[in-house]
Amino acid sequence: MTDRLTAQLAFLHEADSLKTVLRGTPIHDGSRRENSAEHSWHIMLYALTLAEHATREIDIARVLKMLLLHDIVEIDAGDNPIHGDHDPAEMEAAEQAAADRLFGLLPPDQATEYRALWDEFEAAESDDAIFAKSLDRIQPVVANLQSGGGTWSEYNVTYQQLETRVGVKAKRGAPTVWAHIEHHIRAWFTTNAS
């Protein structure tokens, strides 16, 4: 039991580092960028609050677990903003290596369970993962809207890029939520297009 608890506490200690990973997304008041731990908490709250808007029946407990774990790899791999300039293959390799290391800190049964949830989220094929991935795309959009455009100008984001990179995935799992915010997105880009 001592070895198991030691491994669990080592994982939890390492997970604290997620609080130091700054994301490309600002908090709503625009005063600073959110960290990855804050993002994970916020989209879990999104899931709990917006579960009724999932396209299919979901298991909210599984969705919450996926969202809690989905960005833990950023401890090693860092945050790669969806509109940033990075090599997707390199990013995937770094995240896979991070998942191996971080989940490998846990006792084998928990390592297997957490890694399976992380892999399921990444694949975005199950109803639970599709909904979770949709919210992971929607939350930064709302933060950018609430902060007056956030980092869209910094990354030279266009409406079409947002629709292609974010809207398509958001609509898969939470189309009513996306439709509700889409007119705000259009209005922002109409007003702020360069």
Image (cartoon, helix red, strand yellow):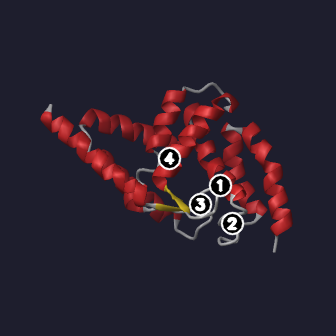
Label 4, label 2: how far apart the Cα atoms are: 21 Å
As drawn, the residue found furthest toward the bottom would be 194
Q: In which quarter of the image is the C terminus?
A: bottom right
| Mark 2 residue type | Trp
Proximity of marks 4 and 1: CB atoms separated by less than 8 Å = no
Asked if 95 appears above or below 157 in the picture, the reply is: above
Left or right: residue 166 compared with residue 121 = right
Read off the residue under disc 3: 25
Label 1, label 2: how far apart the Cα atoms are: 11 Å
Residue 74, image quadrant: bottom left
Mark 3 or mark 4, which is nearer the start of the sequence? 3
Residue drawn at point x = 59 percent, y = 47 percent: 136
Label 1, label 3: how far apart the Cα atoms are: 7 Å
Label 4, label 1: how far apart the Cα atoms are: 14 Å
Question: Badge 1: how crowded within 10 Å, few (<14), some, or many (20+)?
Answer: many
Proximity of marks 1 and 3: CB atoms separated by less than 8 Å = yes
Read off the residue under disc 2: 152
Secondary structure beneath dot 1 equals helix
Residue drawn at point x = 67 percent, y = 32 percent: 54
The one of 77 and 33 positioned closer to us in this rendering = 33
List x then y, in percent, for residue 126. Answer: 56, 33
Mark 2 or mark 1, which is nearer the start of the sequence? 1
Secondary structure beneath dot 4 equals helix
Read off the residue under disc 4: 40
